[in-house]
Image (cartoon, grey):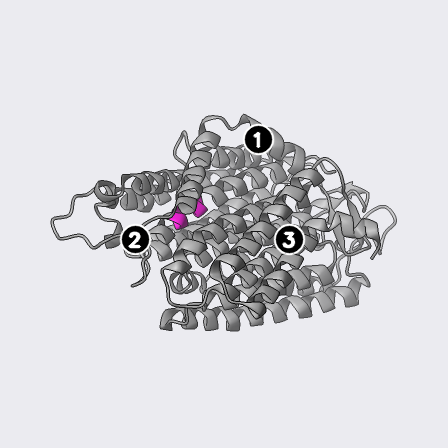
C-alpha cells in the first residue's frame, strides 16, 4: 500500500486508530468518559475528513477498494449514525451497572466494518467488511448480558455465521466459474464487448451470496431473526443494527448492481437488471422484485398487532428495505439517487425513534412496551413530539422527510415503468400508517394510574435528539439542497 492509498483511506485509518487508542486507554485506566471521548473524537475526525474528501481525494486502492462519491456518501452516513449512537449510548450506559468501556471499541469496529463495505469492489474486502461489522454487532447485542440479550446475540451469531458461510462458498463458486473476484471484471472475461453467458456454477454462487446479503438486509425470507434481535439488544445498539448494518450492505448491493467507470460501462437504461453487475440475468430481476413485494407485505402485516415498540420498528424496517429494493431495481443514476435520498430519511427517522426509546430506558429496563408511551405527551411533551415526527416520517406523511423519500422512490419506479411495484409500495404505505399512528395515539392518551419516574436526559442527548427532529422536518419542508447533494454524490459517478 502506497502513501497515496493511505491518504485515500484516511477516514478508515482514523477510525481504526481510534479503536486502538480506546483499547490502550482501557488497559491503562478504566474511564467511561475518557473512552467515550476517544471514540466520539475519532468518529467526528473521520467525518470531518470525509467532508474534505468530497472535494479532494478519490481513487482506487489496488484492485480491492474504491473511494468515489458513492463511497464517501455512504461512509458519511455510517459515521454520522455511529456518532449519534455513541452520544445516545453514553447517557444510556451511565444508568447501568455494566462496565461500558469495551462498548465503544465495538462501536468503532462496527463503523469500520460498514466503511469497508462501502468501498468494496472485491470479494475479499466485501467479506472482510461484512465480518468486522457482524462480529462487532454480536458483542454489542449481548453487551448487557441479560437473558434476552444473550439469547438474541446467540440467534444472531448462529444465523449470521450460517449466512457468512453461504457468502464465502458462493464467492468461491463465482471465482471458479469466472476466474476473478473483482465485481466489475466478473462478466468481462468471456466477451470483448459485453458479458458472456453466466454459467450454472456462477449462478449458484450468486444465489448463495445473496442469501448472506439478504440476511444482513433482513428481507423476506431471511428476516426471522430481526424482531428477536431488536428486542433483546440495548436500545442504542438496535438503532445501530437498523441503520448502519443495513445501509452499508445496501450500498454494497448498489455497487454490485450498477457497474463501474473502471469496467467501462453502466448497466441498462431501464429496468434490465444487472446487465453490468456481478450476476446478470433477467430471472434475478424477478426474484428481487418478488423479495421486495414479500418484504413490504410481511413487514407491515406483522407489525399491525405488535404492542412492543422495538419489535414494531423491527418489522417496520423489513418493509422499508422492501421499499429500497424498488430503487435497486431501477437502473442508472435515478435508482441510485432515490436509494441514497431514502437512506438519509430512513436513517434520520429511525435514529430519532430509537433515540426516544433510549432516552426513556432506565436502569430497570427498556421502554419497549406500548404502555410505556401511553400519556407521554403529558409528561415529556418534547420527547412525544419527536417520536410523533419520527413515526409520521416512517409512515411517509407530507411535510416530513419520509414523504419526500417515498416520493423519490415512486418517481424512480414510475420512470422505469415498474408500475406494479409502485402501486404495491403505495398500498403498503397505507397499511403502515395504522401501526405508526397507534404509537402516536398512545402518547396522547391520558392515564389514570400513577406514572413511574422517567430518567433524566443529558444535555448532549437532548441536543442530538433535537437535531434529529429538526432534520426530519427540515428535509420534509425544504428537500432541495439535500436532493442536489444526493444526486451529485450517488448519481454522478466520480
Residue ranking furthest to the right? 192
Residue 72 place in picture, x, y as percent: 67, 43
Label 2 residue SS = loop
Residue 11 place in picture, x, y as percent: 68, 49
> Could you say which quadrant of the image residue 483 lies in?
top right
Q: Is residue 7 above or below residue 18?
A: above
Q: CA distance from mark 3 to mark 1?
A: 23 Å
The residue lying toward the viewer, choosing from 328 and 203, is: 328
**Residue highlighted by disc 3:** 115
Tell me the mark number nearer the camera, choosing from 3 and 1: 3
First in residue order: circle 2 vs circle 1? 2
Quarter holding the N terminus is bottom right
Q: Is residue 353 magenta?
A: yes
Label 3 residue SS = helix
Residue 411 visible at all:
yes
Mark 1: few, some, or many residues within 10 Å (few <14, many ≥20)? Answer: some
Residue 56 place in picture, x, y as percent: 75, 37
Tell me the mark number nearer the camera, choosing from 2 and 1: 2
**Residue highlighted by disc 2:** 455
Quarter holding the C terminus is top right
Start-end of magenta stretch: 349-355
Q: Tag on residue 483?
A: 1
First in residue order: circle 3 vs circle 2? 3
Amino acid at each position: 500500500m502506497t502513501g497515496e492509498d493511505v491518504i485515500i483511506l484516511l477516514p478508515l485509518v482514523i477510525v481504526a486508530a481510534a479503536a486502538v487508542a480506546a483499547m490502550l486507554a482501557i488497559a491503562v485506566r478504566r474511564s467511561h468518559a475518557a473512552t467515550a471521548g476517544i471514540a466520539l473524537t475519532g468518529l467526528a475526525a473521520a467525518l470531518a475528513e470525509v467532508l474534505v474528501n468530497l472535494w479532494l481525494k478519490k481513487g482506487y486502492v489496488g484492485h480491492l477498494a474504491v473511494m468515489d462519491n458513492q463511497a464517501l456518501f455512504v461512509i458519511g452516513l455510517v459515521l454520522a449514525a455511529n456518532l449519534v449512537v455513541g452520544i445516545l449510548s453514553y447517557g444510556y450506559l451511565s444508568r447501568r451497572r455494566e462496565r461500558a468501556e469495551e462498548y465503544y471499541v465495538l462501536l468503532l469496529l462496527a463503523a469500520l466494518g460498514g466503511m469497508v463495505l462501502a468501498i468494496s469492489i472485491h470479494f475479499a474486502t466485501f467479506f472482510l467488511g461484512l465480518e468486522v461489522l457482524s462480529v462487532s454487532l454480536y458483542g454489542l447485542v449481548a453487551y448487557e448480558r441479560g437473558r434476552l440479550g444473550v439469547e438474541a446475540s446467540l440467534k444472531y451469531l448462529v444465523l449470521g455465521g450460517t449466512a457468512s458461510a453461504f457468502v464465502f462458498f458462493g464467492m468461491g463458486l463465482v471465482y471458479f466459474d469466472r476466474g476473478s473476484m473483482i465485481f466489475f471484471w466478473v462478466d468481462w472475461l468471456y466477451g470483448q464487448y459485453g458479458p458472456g453467458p453466466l454459467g450454472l456454477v456462477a449462478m449458484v454462487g450468486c444465489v448463495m451470496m445473496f442469501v448472506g446479503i439478504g440476511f444482513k438486509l433482513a428481507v423476506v425470507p431471511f428476516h426471522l431473526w430481526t424482531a428477536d434481535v431488536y428486542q433483546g439488544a440495548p436500545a442504542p445498539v438496535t438503532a445501530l443494527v437498523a441503520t448502519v448494518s443495513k445501509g452499508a450492505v445496501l450500498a454494497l448491493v448498489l455497487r454490485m448492481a450498477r457497474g463501474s467507470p473502471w469496467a467501462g460501462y453502466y448497466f441498462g437504461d431501464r429496468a434490465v437488471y444487472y446487465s453490468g453487475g456481478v450476476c446478470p440475468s433477467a430471472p434475478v430481476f424477478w426474484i428481487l422484485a418478488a423479495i421486495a413485494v414479500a418484504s413490504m407485505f410481511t413487514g407491515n402485516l406483522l407489525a399491525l398487532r405488535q404492542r412492543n415498540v422495538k419489535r414494531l420498528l423491527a418489522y417496520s424496517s423489513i418493509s422499508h428495505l422492501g421499499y429500497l429494493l424498488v430503487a435497486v431495481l431501477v437502473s442508472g443514476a435515478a435508482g441510485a439517487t432515490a436509494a441514497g435520498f431514502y437512506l438519509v430519511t430512513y436513517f434520520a427517522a429511525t435514529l430519532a425513534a430509537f433515540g426516544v426509546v433510549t432516552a426513556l430506558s432506565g436502569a430497570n429496563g427498556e421502554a419497549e412496551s406500548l404502555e410505556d408511551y401511553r400519556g407521554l405527551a403529558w409528561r415529556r411533551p418534547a420527547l412525544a413530539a419527536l417520536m410523533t415526527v419520527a413515526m409520521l416520517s416512517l409512515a411517509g406523511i407530507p411535510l416530513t422527510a419520509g414523504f419526500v423519500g417515498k416520493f423519490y422512490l415512486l418517481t424512480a419506479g414510475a420512470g422505469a415503468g415498474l408500475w406494479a411495484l409502485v402501486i404495491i409500495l403505495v398500498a403498503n404505505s397505507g397499511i403502515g400508517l395504522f401501526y405508526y399512528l397507534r404509537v402516536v395515539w398512545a402518547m396522547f392518551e391520558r392515564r389514570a394510574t400513577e406514572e413511574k419516574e422517567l430518567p433524566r436526559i443529558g444535555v448532549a442527548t437532548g441536543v442530538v435528539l433535537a437535531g434529529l427532529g429538526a432534520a426530519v422536518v427540515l428535509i420534509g419542508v425544504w428537500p432541495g439542497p439535500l436532493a442536489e447533494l444526493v444526486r451529485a454524490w450517488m448519481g454522478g459517478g466520480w
